[in-house]
Amino acid sequence: TPGIRLADTLALIDVLKKQPIDYLHISTRDVWQTSKNDSDDQIPVVDQIKEHTKNEVPLIAVGNIAKPEEAEKVIEDGFNFVALGREILREPQWVEKVQNGQEAGINYSLNETDLKQLRITPPLWKFLTKKIHSKLTAD
């Protein structure tokens, strides 16, 4: 079958766990997404990976984590670290605002007028608007 399946990923993780790695970074479009190939499998992929690693390597989870409470949920679920991707593009001060109790000031949207200030190049803007535009604004 085309594509990488969870079994393939878990086999790769078994090889990686034997290497001197500092962490395993699990990147998905949505941190809580379930299998795209098996609709009967309702356990989030990141949780299946976490179970498989048995705390043998620290885990970083990333994927459409926009709000501080979403990041907290990832940590509460047993992951060692949370990474931010698109969120840092649209709000470079995300971490500082959370640390300073200024969550209300977090920018949850991105539009063309923000590009120069955020130093987002036209090719990156084109990628963001064509490939992942629907994920740029928080629900």
Image: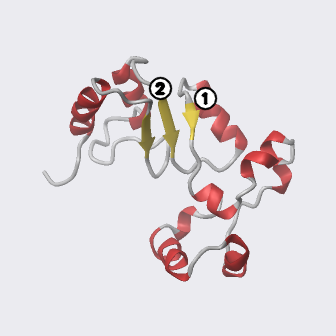
What's under tag 2, amino acid-wise?
Pro
Residue at the (73%, 46%) spot, across then down = 95
| Whether residue 54 is visible | yes
Q: Secondary structure at mark 1?
A: helix
Residue 110: percent from left, percent from top: 67, 70
Between residue 9 and residue 25, name the one nearer to us. 25
Residue at the (56%, 26%) spot, across then down = 77
Look at the picture and state if 110 lies above or below 60: below
- State left or right for residue 122 relative to residue 12: right
- State left or right for residue 44 relative to residue 115: left
In front: label 1 or label 2:
2
Residue at the (49%, 48%) spot, across then down = 30
What's under tag 1, amino acid-wise?
Ile
State if disc 2 and disc 1 touch (CB < 8 Å): no
Q: Which residue is mark 2?
A: 58
Q: Which residue is mark 1?
A: 75
Name which quarter of the figure residue 6 lies in: top left
Between the C-alphas of marks 1 and 2, the distance is: 12 Å
How crowded is the residue under tag 2: few (<14 C-alpha within 10 Å), some, or many (20+)? Answer: some
Residue 36: percent from left, percent from top: 32, 48
Between residue 10 and residue 70, name the one nearer to us. 10
Q: Which of the numbered marks, if any, corresponds to residue 123?
A: none
Between residue 118 and residue 1, name the one nearer to us. 118
Give whichever of discs 1 and 2 has the lower sequence position: 2
Look at the picture and state if 58 lies above or below 85: above
Look at the picture and state if 125 lies above or below 44: below
Residue at the (21%, 52%) spot, across then down = 3
Residue 4: percent from left, percent from top: 23, 47
Quadrant that contains the C terminus: bottom right
| Whether residue 44 is visible | no
